[in-house]
Image (cartoon, rainbow, N blue to C red):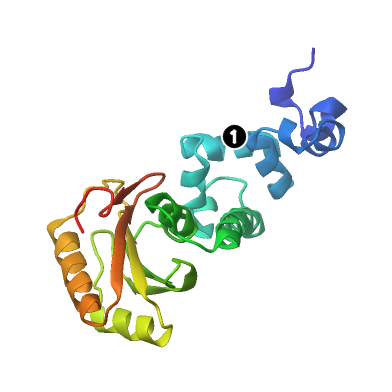
Amino acid sequence: MADYEKLTIKQWAVEDRPREKLLAKGIRSLTDAELIAILIRSGTSRESAVDLAKRILNATGNNLNELSRLSVHDLQKFNGMGEAKAISIIAAMELGRRRKLSEVLQKKQITSSRDVFDFFHPFLGDLSHEEFWVLHLSRSNRILAWKKISQGGIAGTVTDIRLILKDALENMATSLVICHNHPSGNLQPSQADKEITKKIREAAGFMEIRLLDHVVLGNDSYFSFADEGLL
């Protein structure tokens, strides 16, 4: 039997080459490494594209969410990854995010904290810094608009309540949902999170706009103020 570790992809058995395997067995038969190998097209003189892809995945704990956090510069740190290859991976990750968002938008109605998580995860799930977003809803909780209010560092962000209310009035929203991410993965709201939630709820109340929830989003989970009885 051939030693695949020492052969280029072209020397592999036809049924084991990623492109040929896709055609013969379907896209779902490919491993994550094989899919990435198709994106980057070629490896180096010392390793195949699949081996290079495996090395990148191994460095991210074989976690596609962690892979999507890498920048072009981060990917280029791997020997054999040039700018064009890195851009191909970044573009594929972004397409995945947009597909997920389009599926949420087809529903266009928020009925639970999980809906909020599903909506904002494509925006916030892979970030290494904090961002604060707001969702404007109609009387039937259908999505009218969404907007990033602020962007901060690893530990926090500054939120302008006046801007939130101005946009809500312009969009004729009857209710709001606010959301921000914790890049650390710790979903417990800080005292500052609780204070800004209270201020937004009270200020919106004067305009007869309800604050339905404040969702703190992590990599693959979330904390809901509404679910926990904190609103």
For badge 1, the amino acid type reads: Lys
What quarter of the picture does the C terminus occupy?
bottom left
User: Which residue is the site of mark 1?
Assistant: 54
Q: Is residue 199 left or right of residue 61?
A: left
**Residue 15 placement, left or right of 106:** right
Q: Is residue 171 left or right of residue 187?
A: right
Percent position of residue 59, x then y:
48, 38
Can see residue 149? yes
Q: Where does the image place residue 8, in percent across and percent down from the top left?
A: 77, 32
Q: Is 156 or 163 nearer to us in this picture?
A: 163
Residue occupying the point 54% across, 46% down: 78
Decide: is 122 above or below 28: below
User: Helix, strand or loop at disc 1?
Assistant: helix
Q: In the current view of this chain or complex, which residue is farthest to the top?
A: 1
Q: Of residues 213 and 138, which is closer to you in this image?
A: 138
Residue 173 placement (x, y as % from top left) = 39, 78
Instruction: Looking at the picture, tell me which residue is in the foreground, 172 or 67.
Output: 172
Query: Residue at 64% of width from left, 36% of height from top?
Result: 33
Drawn side of residue 29 relative to residue 117, left or right:
right
Asked if one can make out residue 152 in the rendered structure from this viewpoint, the answer is no
- Quadrant in the picture for the N terminus: top right
Q: Quadrant of residue 170?
A: bottom left
